[in-house]
Amino acid sequence: MQQDITQRLERIEEAIIAPPKEYLNIKQAASFIGVSRQTLDLWRMNAKGPAVHRVGTRVLYSIADLRTFMAENRQESML
């Protein structure tokens, strides 16, 4: 029991100390802006979505780019 508590406290401490992520993978980015992974894949294939960074075979999205994309696609309600 005490070991479990100690492990949990260590994970909390690591999370607090760790620097915030600047780049997200596809799954994380999709969740961040509230769309499916498939939607992000489609946008990327059609060059319509947020800017993307390729590092080797990895596809990463900058949080700043995701926020910019969302702001640029904001629409006022028509009421």
Image (spheres, helix red, strand yellow):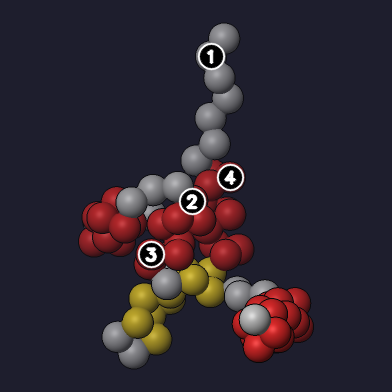
Please name the residue that numbered disc 4 is placed on.
Answer: 71
Look at 39% across and 86% down and name the residue there. 55
Placement of 61 over or under 70, stated as above or below: below
Please name the residue that numbered disc 2 is placed on.
Answer: 33
Q: Amino acid at mark 1?
A: Met
Q: Amino acid at mark 2?
A: Ile
Q: Secondary structure at mark 2?
A: helix
Please name the residue that numbered disc 1 is placed on.
Answer: 78
Spatial separation of the CA atoms under disc 2 and disc 3? 10 Å
* Horizontal arrangement in the rendering, residue 13 relative to residue 37 (left or right): right
Q: Amino acid at mark 3?
A: Lys
Quarter where residue 12 is shown: bottom right
Look at 57% across and 54% down and name the residue there. 68
Q: Amino acid at mark 4?
A: Ala
Q: Of discs 3 and 4, which sits in the foreground?
A: 3
Where is residue 19? Give x, y as percent: 70, 81
* Horizontal arrangement in the rendering, residue 27 relative to residue 43 (left or right): right
Q: Of discs 4 and 2, which sits in the foreground?
A: 2
Where, quadrant-wise, is the C terminus in this rendering? top right
- Mark 2 or mark 3: whose residue is earlier in sequence: 3
Q: Nearer the viewer, residue 48 or 12?
A: 12
Please name the residue that numbered disc 3 is placed on.
Answer: 27
Look at 53% across and 69% down and name the residue there. 62
- Mark 2 or mark 1: whose residue is earlier in sequence: 2
Spatial separation of the CA atoms under disc 2 and disc 1? 22 Å
Q: Are marks 4 and 2 in contact (CB under 8 Å)?
A: no
